[in-house]
Image: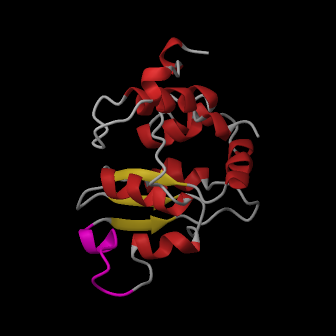
Amino acid sequence: MCARCVISSPACAGSTGYGHEDEGRLALDALFAELVSAPAALVRPQFFSGTHTIACALYGTLRPGDELLALAGHPYDTLEEVIGLRGRPGDGSLAELGVTYRELPLTAAGGLDWAAIEAGVLKPNTRHVTLRQRERVRTIAESAPSCSTQCGAHPALARLCHAPDAHDS
């Protein structure tokens, strides 16, 4: 296990509640990142569902004028309101905040449309690309002759292709 993952008595001590330089929080984040082979992790009990966690990441990183692109068809139904595909006006969706959304359907074989990706489906303002399900990641990884060849030109796709889950499970 990594040296930064040590959970000791001080890590379990009380905190001011603000979490600044909280040894326990930092150690838990490091341990979780190590366990899932990620470069970093953010582990908080305040994230109460996968959708909530994804929404926090999207709201925290997307800005007006940015684009969210779904490469594997329609998103989870629970993300539709976050994106702004349905819901009540004034709920604060990404669309209301000026973030655009597009989706690229899967091919008839169930894989990514690499031809469309190579033809320039990604725009300069595409900040995030998403996949819908873990099972689709496996299918998509298998559909590309060389993921790194296909993804190398765009940083968001390169991160996707080199993610640990993209090739195993």
How far across and down, in percent of the image, does residue 20 sit? Answer: 27, 34
Left or right: 56 with respect to 115?
left
Quadrant occupied by the N terminus = top right
Residue 31 visible, this angle? yes
Q: Tell which of 8 and 112 is nearer to you.
A: 8
The residue lying at 47 percent from left, 56 percent from top is 54
The residue lying at 32 percent from left, 72 percent from top is 95
Q: Eyeballing the image, is 143 above or below 3?
A: below
Residue 125 visible, this angle? no
Quadrant occupied by the C terminus = top right
How far across and down, in percent of the image, does residue 131 sit? Answer: 58, 55
Q: Is residue 93 magenta?
A: yes
Left or right: 130 with respect to 165?
left
Q: Eyeballing the image, is 67 above or below 166?
A: below
Q: Tell which of 31 and 132 is nearer to you.
A: 31
Boundaries of the magenta span: 88-98
The residue lying at 35 percent from left, 31 percent from top is 22
Q: Tell which of 10 and 27 is nearer to you.
A: 10
Left or right: 114 with respect to 83?
right
